[in-house]
């Protein structure tokens, strides 16, 4: 009977030990294949501990994986995260976080082995002194579907008196995609001309149509002008209308796109361009027609006056010329009526 009771007690202690160990790890996955996928803007919680028996790397580190949505090279991933400090060291936070890509259940350990020490600069990040961190990570690799957040603590404690648990939570902010922009080089531009910029994604493809860009133009003596444009086929055109104070001067051009929740902010390198006085606009079709009618009217009056005082064959010749010019004048006046409405 005593043996049965002892066996039951042993099993109970074993089960309790398993449940205690299992409950110490909450949230995330213990390997990449078990990692839940994170959604942007959702709040997630987890818990890690310093118990050596719970370590899932090397017998001394406990790691939790969370799968990220697809990302591309140069994207910026933002994480707001929090944790509790050590009990014995209230000002120190044990939790570390990093972003890893291109791993699976068989390779993540070797990648983890090459990690750097935790600090506020990364690539392995530590919490700030307040216990919360707003961490921005720039994606370096091109792998898009196997990207993970790794949270980990050192789990080297074997004495139950030293056991601690470290709850944490985090929220994934919008993933900002990379933009590249540059002004097309020119040495001279009219004050009423057009200057263009190119806008591309990290993979070299044109930026989506409709992205707003700003252009700032500055020149000597405090001159400044601003213009707006939108991308179309990876090109942004800015129609200039610079004042006379800019004529003949070297002006500095900078185009920019503000961060918008989908794409990162970008600013082009400065471009210095000579500003030329705008050319006079060509006359309109109406003005050309009016001027032609005026010339024919004067010619008709002159021929008519000369024919009035002429005699003989000369009078007949001038009269015929005046009639021809009159027909042309009437046609020109009809053209004016059609164009100048």
Image: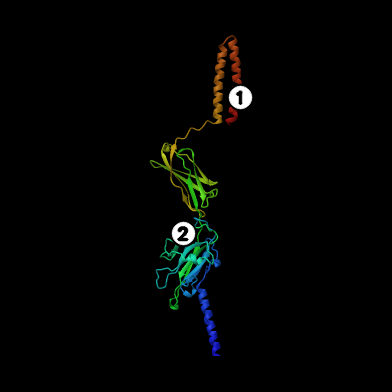
Q: Is residue 159 above or below residue 126?
A: below
Question: What secondary structure is marked by label 2?
Answer: strand
Location of mark 1 (residue) = 331
Q: Residues within 10 Å of mark 2 (few under 14, many from 20)?
A: some
Is label 1 in contact with label 2 (beta carbons under 8 Å)?
no
Q: CA distance from mark 1 to mark 2?
A: 73 Å
Q: Residue at x 60, y 27 (%)?
A: 335
In terms of sequence position, does the residue under pointer 1 or pointer 2 come before the other? 2
Screen quadrant of the N terminus:
bottom right
The spot of residue 193 in percent (x, y) is 49, 38
Coloration of the structure image: rainbow
> Along the line of sight, which residue is nearer the eye, 248 or 144?
144
> Along the line of sight, which residue is nearer the eye, 90 or 337?
90
Location of mark 2 (residue) = 136
Q: Residues within 10 Å of mark 1 (few under 14, many from 20)?
A: few
Question: What secondary structure is marked by label 1?
Answer: helix
Q: Quadrant of residue 2?
A: bottom right
The spot of residue 16 in percent (x, y) is 52, 79
Judged from this view, the residue extending furthest toward the top is 312
> Along the line of sight, which residue is nearer the eye, 320 or 5?
5
Q: Which mark is residue 255?
A: none
Q: Residue at x 60, y 12 (%)?
A: 316
Q: Quadrant of residue 340?
A: top right
Q: Is residue 174 above or below residue 221?
A: below
Q: Mark 1 vs mark 2: give the one in front.
A: 2
How many discs appear? 2
The spot of residue 253 in percent (x, y) is 44, 44
């Amino acid at each position: 009977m005593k043996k049965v009771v002892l066996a039951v007690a042993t099993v109970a202690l074993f089960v309790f030990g398993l449940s205690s160990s299992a409950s110490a790890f909450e949230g995330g996955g213990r390997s990449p294949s078990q990692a839940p996928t994170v959604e942007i803007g959702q709040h997630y919680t987890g818990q890690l501990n310093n118990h050596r028996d719970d370590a899932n790397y090397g017998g001394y580190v406990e790691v939790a994986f969370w799968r990220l949505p697809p990302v591309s090279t140069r994207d910026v991933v933002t994480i707001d995260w929090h944790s509790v400090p050590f009990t014995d060291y209230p000002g120190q936070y044990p939790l570390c976080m990093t972003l890893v890509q291109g791993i699976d259940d068989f390779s993540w350990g070797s990648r983890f082995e090459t990690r750097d020490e935790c600090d506020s600069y990364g690539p392995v990040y530590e919490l700030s002194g307040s216990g919360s961190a707003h961490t921005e990570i720039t994606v370096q690799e091109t792998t898009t579907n196997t990207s993970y957040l790794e949270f980990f603590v050192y789990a080297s404690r074997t004495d139950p008196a030293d056991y601690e648990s470290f709850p944490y939570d985090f929220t994934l902010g919008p993933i900002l995609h990379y933009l590249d922009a540059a002004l097309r080089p020119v040495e001279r531009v009219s004050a009423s001309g057009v200057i263009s910029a190119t806008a591309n994604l990290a993979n070299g493809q044109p930026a989506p149509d409709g992205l707003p860009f700003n252009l700032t133009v500055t020149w000597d003596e405090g001159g400044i002008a601003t213009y707006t444009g939108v991308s179309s086929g990876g090109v942004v055109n800015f129609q200039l209308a610079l004042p006379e104070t800019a004529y003949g001067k070297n002006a500095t051009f900078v185009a920019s796109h503000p961060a918008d929740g989908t794409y990162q902010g970008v600013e082009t390198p400065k471009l210095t361009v000579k500003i030329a006085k705008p050319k006079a606009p060509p006359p309109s079709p109406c003005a050309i027609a009016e001027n032609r009618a005026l010339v024919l009217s004067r010619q008709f009056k002159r021929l008519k006056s000369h024919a009035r005082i002429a005699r003989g064959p000369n009078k007949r010749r001038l009269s015929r010329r005046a009639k021809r010019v009159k027909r042309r004048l009437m046609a020109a006046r009809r053209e004016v009526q059609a164009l100048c409405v």
